[in-house]
Amino acid sequence: MSNILSPGLKLYWLLTILLLVAVRLSVAQQQETCELAASITKTAKAYHFNPRPVDDVYSRLVMTGFLRLLDPDHIFLTEKDRKSLKKKYAQRLDDLIREEDCSFLSEVTQLYVSRIKFVDSLMNSLSPADFNFEVYDTLDMSDEFRIADKQDLSAYWKKLVKLHALSLYCRRMDSNSRENEMSAQIMDSCLLQSISRQQCRIKARTTHSGGSKAYARQCYLKSIASAFDPHTGFFTRNEQQAFYGALSKTRKSFGIQFTRNDLGEMEITAIVPGSPAWKSNLLNEGDVILDIVSKDITKDLSCSRPSEVATLLASPGLSKAVFGIRKKSGKQIKVPLRKAETAVQENVISSFVLRGKQDIGYIYLPSFYTQMENPWSTTDGCANDVATELIKLKREGISGLIIDLRDNGGGSMMEAILLSGIFINYGAVSISKSRDEEPVTLRDRNRGTIYMDPVIVLINEFSASASELFAAAMQDHRCAVVVGTPSTGKATMQVMMPVDAWKYEDVNEVPEDADAFLKMTSGAFYRVTGESHQKTGVQPDIILPSLYDSLDIGESSYEAAIQAEIIDKKTYYYPMRKKPVEKLQQLSRQRIKTDSTFLAVKEMSARVPDYINSQSIPLQFDAFGKYRSQQEGFSIPERKAEFRVENPSYLKGISSLVNEGEEINQRNMDAINRDIYLGETWNIMMDWITLTKK
């Protein structure tokens, strides 16, 4: 008998060997994931500020968080799937994590992949002939809606296709020439485009770096970390580098901002002034990035997830690349770019003069950035930049200062302390407490201030962490009047450490060259009074109506949030004389009571919960047209303010930190002039100056 195998048999054995290798590799990856999962709990037990017991409650939090991350829109896993998983594992995950048992992850991943394949198969089978827009039907888009079973899953995705097609159709038809009769030809085109869009949505799951299984593993690890508290998180090395980059004033980047358009493509939304992309003169807003090619990677971006692309571009290993671009004209070009130090647009300070009855300085601080390579520097972060801007604004003869911290999610606590010191003469700024250690007073070590005239700090629901430390310090020292809406309520601090830090007795001994990290909640900070704004937020002296007043969106909305406490710590601080807060409150309330824009905000705020929980969208052609025309938006109304917005004379018509940003600068000035919250803050400042003069 011959020892030579036939070609067909050779191919069979080759495929069998490859399959066995793939299975073994998959098992090894899953086992590694379960080892990382156990390490997360061990490191949290060793270093977390207030580690949650790894018990049945923790198990339930992991389960809930995992399913939310894996399928946030409830469009792949059915309620039957979820109930089955919860019944089997909700009380067991703590034990499985300790034992490094992968059975839960394996079962969920297999189910998740099978549901994706099912939906993908459904999309591939659809054609325009499968849809009827004459029959009345609706799509429930409320938060309460759940897909019951596999049959409902199929019906739901077909409705998604119909909804997207109707939206595309309405967008294509000019409002002045829209006919009552539906054009079958145009609708068929919209249906094909809609099906393609949904296929992209599915492909984004399967083309995630490492595939759907890798995505499920990432979600699992992240949920295990966040079950300790909302701000403890699992990071890959690339994610860690991107996180550090977001806290810096500058970073090496290509200078491209993008989003996913209706077709699932990466469409450029902005080019950062002064960046490599800007200087190339080859890219414009509206261009589509088709692929990215470098020495070590070729990445097709069709249907990719924006977060995955952002992480790739922020990766320190990607220093130069060739971008495949499709211009608006349809022409395709190749654009080679090399990373360069570029201003982080999210961290660019804007300073303006609001001119009117009085000239008021205005500084917008989007984050408490620092120089991550030297976090203890007192000259490379936002505090020094604000001080520089303020000194220049004083030369304009300003009578007051508005510091805008709205949507400022925090950053460096050290920068918040340094910034407080600019306005506080001396004394305690805040109190910090680490695990198993006595509270420590955080002091302003430099006597004196650089500004003594009226200061207003403007905050909102999304001002968090370091923003809250600064606002609370200014409020406690009576250095400023705080205006806006109650802040987020995050009074905890985080540090980055490798996942396996539990192996070391001293966290300072842990090597930094790891592949996986934890952003660990390591402490909490308190007001100089010993009170905490954890879960309650900093309460403004003067509260303004908000679109989100009817929603619970702060720290208190997280089930895993750390509870607030009061500590007994003697501090020495020296408040300035009392401000006329009561009178300012009264005058502001009188204005808002009759202000049409704020009355509109209050009315919309009352309707938001019902809108979220009862979104039933008609899918019949005529009914959808009426629904669309009757839809009222929930955008915050605008109104021209009583002041003029100007650049300080030293800026000569450009934004303070971006030399090439005249267009951005003008856009910022227009937005400031129409901002009703800044308009009312201006009025409060005028009242304050008038009362002071009297």
Image (cartoon, grey):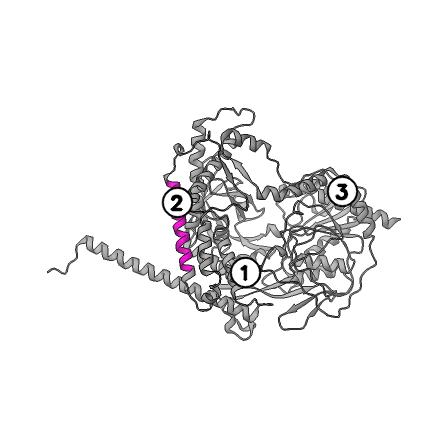
- Under tag 2, what secondary structure? helix
Q: Is residue 66 left or right of residue 357?
A: left
Check whether the beta carbons of the residues at disc 3 and disc 1 lie within 8 A of each other.
no
Q: Which residue is mark 1?
A: 226
Q: Callout 2, which amino acid? A: Asp
Name the residue tied to disc 3: 592
| Nearest to the observer: residue 396 or residue 75 | 75
**Distance Cα–Cα, label 2 vs label 3:** 52 Å
**Label 1 crowd bin: few (<14), some (14–19), many (20+), radius 10 Å:** many
Position of 447 relative to 108 (above/below): below
Q: Earlier in the sequence, mark 3 or mark 1?
A: 1
Q: First in sequence: mark 2 or mark 3?
A: 2
Residue 670, given in percent of the width and then of the height, sits at 68, 40
- Residue situated in front as seen by the camera: 437 or 240: 437
Q: Is residue 598 above or below residue 565?
A: above
User: Gap in Å between the C-alphas at discs 1 and 2?
Assistant: 31 Å
Quarter of the figure with residue 435: bottom right
- Residue 181 percent location from the top left of the image: 49, 24
Label 2 near label 1: C-beta < 8 Å? no
Provide the residue span drawn in magenta: 105-124
Residue 660, horizontal then vertical, whole percent: 61, 45
Task: Check disc 2 and report the residue beneath it.
Answer: 120
Q: Residues within 10 Å of mark 3 (few under 14, many from 20)?
A: some
Looking at the rendered structure, the kind of residue marked 1 is Ser
The answer to whether residue 644 is left or right of residue 183 is: right
- Judge from the rendering whether residue 364 lies leftward or rightward of residue 342; answer left or right: right
- Residue drawn at point x = 75 percent, y = 54 percent: 391
Magenta-colored stretch includes residue 356: no
Q: Circle 1 sits in a helix, a strand or a loop, which is it? A: helix
Q: Under tag 3, what secondary structure?
A: helix
